[in-house]
């Protein structure tokens, strides 16, 4: 048999394989397992969005190939929403491109800018797609550690200057998966300064901007002066409207970068099914009402989970955004060991922090995207730590 490529062989080992195996074992023993591992909302897509899609599905013009950049009306709805939500002006014709989920755009962006030997800066712990996409494009990955003492923001001064000179691209993402940390304007300002000094592109991943609590409003990277000169922002309808299965997202910002990403896409895919885009238009045009309902559900769960973790004596910071809790593993355990204990003793699946990178060791991630949150919370409260 033909061997797979070096790029496939280079893929990091699947760190959740052990958890998956243990989960099967525990289930086989008859234990009732609650999965707080995956970050995929359990709540259905709002009914009005589904209705808009059903109507759009009946139109024969939607059955043909869509345009790869997306329908003008969709790009216009994106621009209108960015203006309302963040005060950011975008030209729907040149500064917006639709994506088949933001993961697609994140995975394709390095192909537009990375040649062999070029570096990309990626957060550690971080969304695994960033380093893999860079590696697939033939680039080198430089991991920026996200440490608690820095509020889980990368220490920009700590990045090796020689690496910066070879850097073409930097991935950042706040509100952050997995740490749930948030970023403010002063951080983005420093990122923009550095990007201008060393001439690299900034890709901000803002998938969680609408999953926020206590009236906290996450900002957009593009709100900061100069951002559009150096970068783009990825966004997704997945988390914002409980639409993970629909595959719809977009990138906005610098027109050259949007055009370059578009160029990769025209050669690889053919855009998002137009009926899904019409559903997306409805969602974005009605974002304010739809988001409030979604946020209310997660706010209640966040409060319940925070109380449970406190009762169990675990160390964590209450998230202001995202549906994740990034929790310190108790003394004497590794991430893998404690995750195993929670599963075997309480039937609770969580994600070991090192699954997101070496700097995630010592933590585990809880996702509140499970309908059985109350039972999960009771079990965690009773966890002897
Ligand atoms: C969920 C998520 C996304 C969104 O992915 P889609 O492909 O749009 O569903 C992007 N970035 C991060 C960090 C995520 O957790």
Image: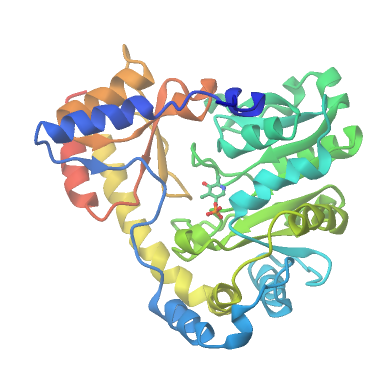
Residue 378 appearing in the image = yes
Quadrant of the image for the N terminus?
Answer: top right
Q: Residue at x 43, y 77 (%)?
A: 50
Please tell me how many numbered marks the rendered image carries.
Answer: 0
Q: Residue furthest left?
A: 30
Q: Which of the pair 55/267 is nearer the observer? A: 267
Image quadrant of residue 93? Answer: bottom right
Q: Which of the pair 341/188 is nearer the observer? A: 341
Q: In the rendered view, does 340 fall on the left or right side of 92? A: left
Q: Is residue 260 positioned above or below 52 on the image?
A: above
Q: Is residue 292 positioned above or below 7 on the image?
A: below
Q: Find residue 111 and report its horizontal and vertical position in percent.
A: 77, 42
Residue 189 appearing in the image = no
Q: Is residue 298 positioned above or below 307 on the image?
A: below
Quadrant of the image for the C terminus?
Answer: top left
Q: Find residue 17 and report its horizontal and vertical position in percent.
A: 37, 28
Q: Residue furthest top?
A: 332
Q: In the rendered view, does 256 fall on the left or right side of 213? A: right
Q: Find residue 9 and report its horizontal and vertical position in percent.
A: 59, 23
Image quadrant of residue 83? Answer: bottom right
Q: Which of the pair 18/190 is nearer the observer? A: 18
């Amino acid at each position: 048999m033909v061997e797979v490529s070096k790029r496939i062989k280079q893929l990091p080992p699947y760190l959740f394989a052990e958890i998956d195996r243990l989960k099967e074992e525990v289930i086989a023993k008859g234990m009732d397992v609650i999965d707080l591992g995956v970050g995929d909302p359990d709540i259905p897509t709002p009914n009005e969005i589904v209705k808009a899609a059903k109507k759009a599905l009946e139109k024969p013009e939607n059955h043909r190939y869509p345009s790869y950049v997306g329908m003008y009306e969709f790009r216009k709805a994106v621009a209108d929403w960015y203006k309302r939500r963040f005060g950011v002006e975008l030209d729907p014709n040149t500064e917006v491109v639709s994506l088949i989920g933001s993961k697609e755009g994140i995975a394709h962006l390095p192909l537009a800018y990375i040649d062999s030997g070029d570096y990309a800066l990626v957060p550690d712990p971080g969304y695994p797609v960033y380093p893999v996409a860079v590696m697939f494009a033939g680039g080198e990955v430089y991991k920026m550690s996200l440490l608690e003492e820095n509020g889980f923001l990368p220490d920009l001064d700590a990045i090796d200057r020689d690496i910066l000179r070879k850097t073409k691209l930097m991935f950042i993402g706040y509100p952050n998966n997995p740490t749930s940390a948030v970023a403010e304007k002063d951080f983005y300002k420093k990122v923009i300064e550095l990007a201008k000094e060393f001439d690299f592109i900034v890709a901000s991943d803002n998938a969680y901007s609408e999953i926020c609590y206590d009236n906290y409003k996450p900002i957009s990277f593009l709100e900061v002066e100069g951002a559009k000169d150096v970068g783009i922002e990825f966004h997704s309808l997945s988390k914002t409207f409980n639409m993970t299965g629909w595959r719809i997202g977009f990138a906005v910002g610098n027109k050259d970068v949007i055009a370059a990403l578009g160029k990769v896409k025209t050669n690889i895919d053919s855009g998002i099914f137009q009926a899904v885009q019409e559903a997306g238009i409805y969602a974005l045009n009605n974002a304010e009402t739809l988001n409030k309902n979604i946020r209310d559900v997660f706010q209640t769960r966040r409060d319940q989970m925070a109380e449970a973790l406190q009762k169990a004596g675990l160390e964590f910071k209450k998230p202001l955004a995202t549906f994740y809790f990034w929790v310190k593993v108790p003394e004497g355990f590794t991430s893998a060991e404690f995750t195993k204990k929670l599963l075997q003793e309480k039937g609770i699946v969580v994600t070991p922090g090192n699954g997101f990178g070496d700097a995630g060791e010592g933590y585990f991630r809880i996702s509140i995207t499970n309908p059985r949150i109350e039972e999960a919370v009771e079990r965690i409260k009773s966890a002897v730590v």
